[in-house]
Image: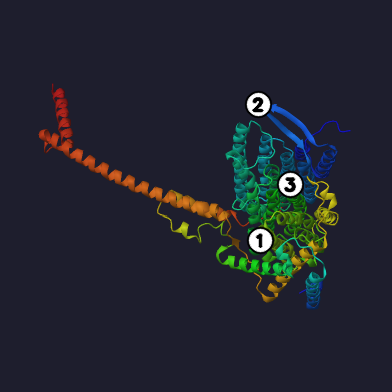
């Protein structure tokens, strides 16, 4: 193993410093809410800390909802290119000598041989 | 001065032809010269109609300039120039020619003064851009390009149908305010909507853009959707339906963006989210809102281009684009990291960056016009876009866990292109009056008042706080290699499998019917044969035909024998 160069964020101390600075900014911004005279154009904005609270809550909800969405939206990476392996609707269909399914099998084989090359840029 | 007023698409099309026959240095010089010369030319030309002729009974206007189209004309020139600089290292005639044609088609579309010309450029946009996807030269990009092309051409066909109805009803082809009145107007609206990536018609974008080449995606992100935004802004300002469609567009993609692994697909989702803000602005339709929509389109071309360029640089240098495989790149790609963060700050609408000065107009307009809930959705989308495009993109590519990849910064031309875009993002953010002076209306809007700056900064910082908190708690969804189902599942899986099942059933029924028919036919034949048998039985009850034949043969043989004896 070659001796690794140390980079800025390799040191946990630096991360801690940055986070502290960030928390400081957040607190400062929250306090500014009480100091700066705001002209309000909507009722909701009268609430102290409306924007900070909204931003925080919205993002937490967003992430939790998106994580929950994974439970029913997530599929294998090659879901679309690997047709028919995990889909009941297709495998349950009649495979007894009908043209549709046999041509599909051929297509699958062709596809399987062709995938795998990922030409990024020529 | 300038002798003729040449429509801007002409130099680009001629340029594409020259590019086809030149190589190396000369080709690069020509590709760079064309957008610059064409932009200068456009700068000199006054507003008005510059080219028109009569086609059958209709007036065609292939070249018309007003404030709305001029703004898009400028930004398309900027986008073309940046994209060309970004792709200077390429030695791929197919991509370079199609990029020139594509940029030209975009310009043709925004300066089209009638629906027929618009339709022609509308279809040209599809046919020229698909090569930027196919140029990846993989099986995946080929099929994605096909799906892209089918949907784009479909949009064009609907536009043509709408245009024909519209021409018959109104006896004019002029492309101005249309509004939702009858069938023709709805058809045109749907055609624009498909290209604008309305919900449920949006998957061509998230499907095809991430499959395009590194440089192709930069061009693609600039033109197609913005032409659609321009068309909506001209034909349907103040259509309330657009407010709700736009609000939906801002919100739903951010959920997908959070769980998406392919970082360029994350950008594609956030592109829909940004176009949503523009659509809301057009739907509100006041001077401030339309200004905001158009200004946001202008800025989006630049900052979204910058983000696509920075992710393209990552893909170009590492060969990877999945968040799960990247991380720690800031160590060896510091310039790209900084430029990407500028783009991320712009799209997140940080004060002093370009997104701030345009998105805020749309949001203010939504509040002014009493769309309270829509305003809340836009606020949610603002926090969300910061979350997925502002934090997720730079974090998972350049920071997060160290992937061990030590790729260096990309070639100089890529860095120059990104620097120009980043400079524009900052310049517009710091001095928005330059952009405002180009807008269609004069509203005297000032984005930098204390309340607004504070509110936006608070929103963004606490969104970031949410990210930090979730990450420290381990609640943030990890990047996983996966495909997430979206609406395209309907036409990529449900329809095909439903069709297949339907055909299976049809074949089965067909087979049983035939079988039954054959059985019945057999039965009748035996029955008739039986009858026939009985009839002939009167004469030859016990003699089969074989024996008859034999006896005939015997008789003939006897004749033969007798004739010999004689």
Residue B242 visible (yes or no): yes
Helix, strand or loop for disc 3: loop
- Please name the residue shown 72% across and 58% down the image: B315
Q: Kindly report which numbered mark, 3 or 2, lies closer to the viewer in this rendering.
A: 2
Q: Position of residue B508 (x, y in %)?
A: 38, 50
- Quadrant holding the C terminus of chain B: top left
Front residue of B275/B223: it is B275
Query: Upstream in the sequence, badge 3 or badge 2?
Result: 2
Q: Which label's residue is closer to the chain start, 1 or 2?
A: 2
Using residue B84 as the reference point, say whether residue B228 is left or right of it. left
Q: Label 3 belongs to which residue?
A: B92
Q: Which residue is mark 1?
A: B254
Instruction: Name the side, left or right, on which B467 lies relative to B528.
Output: right
As measured in the structure, the alpha-carbon distance from the residue carrying label 3 to the one carrying label 2 is 44 Å
- Chain under numbered label 2: B
Q: Which residue is label 2 attached to?
A: B57
Q: Is residue A3 above or below residue B515?
A: below
Which residue is farthest top? B566
Q: Nearer the viewer, residue B497 or B328?
A: B497
């Amino acid at each position: 193993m070659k001796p690794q160069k140390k980079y800025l964020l390799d040191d946990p101390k630096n991360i801690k410093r940055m986070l502290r600075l960030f928390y400081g900014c957040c607190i400062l911004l929250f306090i500014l809410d009480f100091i700066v005279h705001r002209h309000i154009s909507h009722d909701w904005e009268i609430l102290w800390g409306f924007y900070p609270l909204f931003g925080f809550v919205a993002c937490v909800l967003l992430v939790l909802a998106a994580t929950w969405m994974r439970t029913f939206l997530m599929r294998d990476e090659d879901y679309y290119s690997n047709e028919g392996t995990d889909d009941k609707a297709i495998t349950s269909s009649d495979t007894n000598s009908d043209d549709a399914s046999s041509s599909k099998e051929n297509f699958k084989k062709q596809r399987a041989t062709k995938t795998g090359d990922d030409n990024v840029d020529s | 001065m300038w002798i003729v007023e040449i429509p801007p698409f002409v130099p680009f099309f001629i340029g594409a032809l020259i590019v086809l026959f030149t190589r190396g240095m000369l080709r690069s010089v020509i590709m760079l010269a064309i957008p610059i010369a064409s932009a200068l030319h456009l700068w000199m030309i006054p507003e008005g109609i510059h080219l028109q002729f009569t086609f059958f009974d209709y007036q065609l206007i292939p070249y018309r300039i007003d404030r709305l189209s001029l703004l898009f004309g400028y930004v398309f020139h900027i986008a073309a120039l940046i994209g060309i600089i970004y792709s200077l290292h390429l030695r791929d005639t197919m991509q370079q020619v199609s990029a020139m044609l594509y940029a030209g088609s975009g310009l043709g579309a925004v300066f089209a003064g009638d629906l027929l010309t618009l339709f022609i450029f509308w279809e040209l946009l599809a046919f020229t851009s698909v090569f930027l996807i196919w140029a990846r030269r993989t099986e995946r990009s080929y099929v994605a390009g096909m799906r892209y092309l089918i949907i784009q051409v479909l949009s064009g066909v609907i536009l043509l149908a709408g245009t024909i109805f519209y021409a018959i009803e109104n006896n004019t082809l002029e492309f101005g305010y249309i509004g939702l009145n009858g069938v023709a107007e709805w058809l045109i609206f749907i055609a624009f909507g498909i290209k604008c990536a309305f919900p449920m018609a949006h998957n061509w974008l998230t499907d095809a853009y991430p499959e395009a080449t590194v440089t192709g995606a930069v061009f693609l992100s600039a033109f197609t959707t913005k032409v659609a935004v321009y068309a909506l802004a001209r034909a349907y300002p103040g259509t309330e339906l657009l407010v709700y469609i736009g609000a939906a567009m801002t919100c739903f993609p951010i959920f997908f963006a959070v769980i998406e692994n392919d970082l360029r697909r994350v950008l594609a989702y956030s592109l829909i989210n940004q176009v949503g803000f523009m659509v809301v602005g057009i739907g509100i339709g006041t001077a401030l809102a339309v200004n905001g929509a158009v200004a946001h389109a202008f800025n989006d071309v630049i900052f979204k281009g910058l983000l696509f360029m920075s992710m393209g640089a990552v893909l170009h240098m590492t060969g990877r684009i999945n968040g799960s495989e990247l991380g720690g790149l800031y160590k060896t790609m510091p310039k790209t990291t900084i430029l990407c963060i500028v783009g991320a700050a712009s799209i997140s609408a940080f004060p002093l960056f370009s997104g701030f000065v345009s998105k805020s107009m749309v949001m203010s307009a939504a509040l002014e016009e009493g769309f309270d809930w829509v305003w809340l959705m836009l606020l949610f989308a603002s926090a969300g876009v910061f979350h997925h495009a502002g934090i997720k993109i730079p974090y998972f590519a350049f920071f997060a866990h160290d992937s061990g990849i030590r790729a260096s910064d990309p070639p100089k031309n890529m860095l120059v292109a990104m620097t120009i875009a980043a400079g524009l993002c900052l310049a517009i953010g710091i001095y928005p009056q330059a952009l405002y002076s180009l807008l269609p209306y004069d509203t005297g809007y000032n984005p930098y008042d204390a309340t607004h700056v504070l509110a936006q900064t608070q929103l963004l910082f606490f969104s970031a706080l949410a990210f930090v908190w979730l990450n420290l708690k381990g609640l943030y969804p990890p990047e996983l290699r996966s495909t997430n189902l979206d609406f395209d599942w309907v036409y990529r899986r449900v329809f095909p499998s439903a069709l297949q099942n339907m055909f299976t059933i049809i074949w089965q029924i067909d087979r049983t019917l035939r079988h039954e028919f054959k059985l019945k036919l057999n039965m009748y034949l035996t029955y008739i044969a039986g009858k026939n048998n009985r009839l002939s039985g009167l004469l030859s009850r016990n003699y089969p035909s074989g024996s008859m034949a034999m006896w005939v043969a015997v008789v003939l043989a006897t004749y033969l024998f007798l004739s010999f004896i004689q």
